[in-house]
Amino acid sequence: MTHEELLQVESSARQHNEVMLNQSRLAYTIEQEELGRFNLLRPKIFIDGDQWCCLYGDDIQTGIAGFGSTPDKAIWDWNLQWNKEITKESKQ
């Protein structure tokens, strides 16, 4: 391999590493933002039937609830539910 080819491979590897680092930083920022809401609002976490429930509000019908097989999965589902828009079907 020529010196020029080696420099090109090194440059490509460096660019790839920069992209991967930026993706990791973005994922970390998103995770911190979503967990920040959880830490600020302090929803209740409890077992509901055979799943974990993460609930902000008085009850599942009027509050925002997320469910999962682990507390972490329930928290992530709660974050998804928090961002859902109200539709005509969900009001009925």
Image: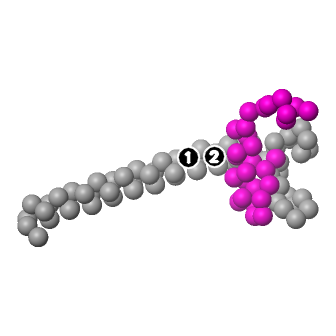
Q: Is residue 88 magenta?
A: yes
What residue does disc 2 label? 34
Q: Residue furthest bottom?
A: 1
| Mark 1 touches mark 2? (CB < 8 Å) | yes
Residue type at mark 1 is Ile
Pick out the residue farthest to the top: 88
The span shown in magenta is 65-92
Q: How is the image coloured?
A: one colour
- Residue 22: percent from the left, percent from the top? 40, 50
- Residue 47 position (above or below residue 80): below
For badge 2, the amino acid type reads: Glu
Residues packed near mark 1 inside 10 Å, few (<14), some (14 to 19) or many (20 plus): few
Mark 1 → mark 2, Cα distance in angstroms: 6 Å
Q: Is residue 61 left or right of residue 4?
A: right
Please state, as top left, top right, bottom left or bottom right, where the N terminus lies in the image.
bottom left
Alpha-carbon neighbours of circle 2 within 10 Å: few (<14), some, or many (≥20)? Answer: some
Q: Quadrant of residue 47?
A: bottom right
Residue sitting at 25 percent across and 57 percent down? 12
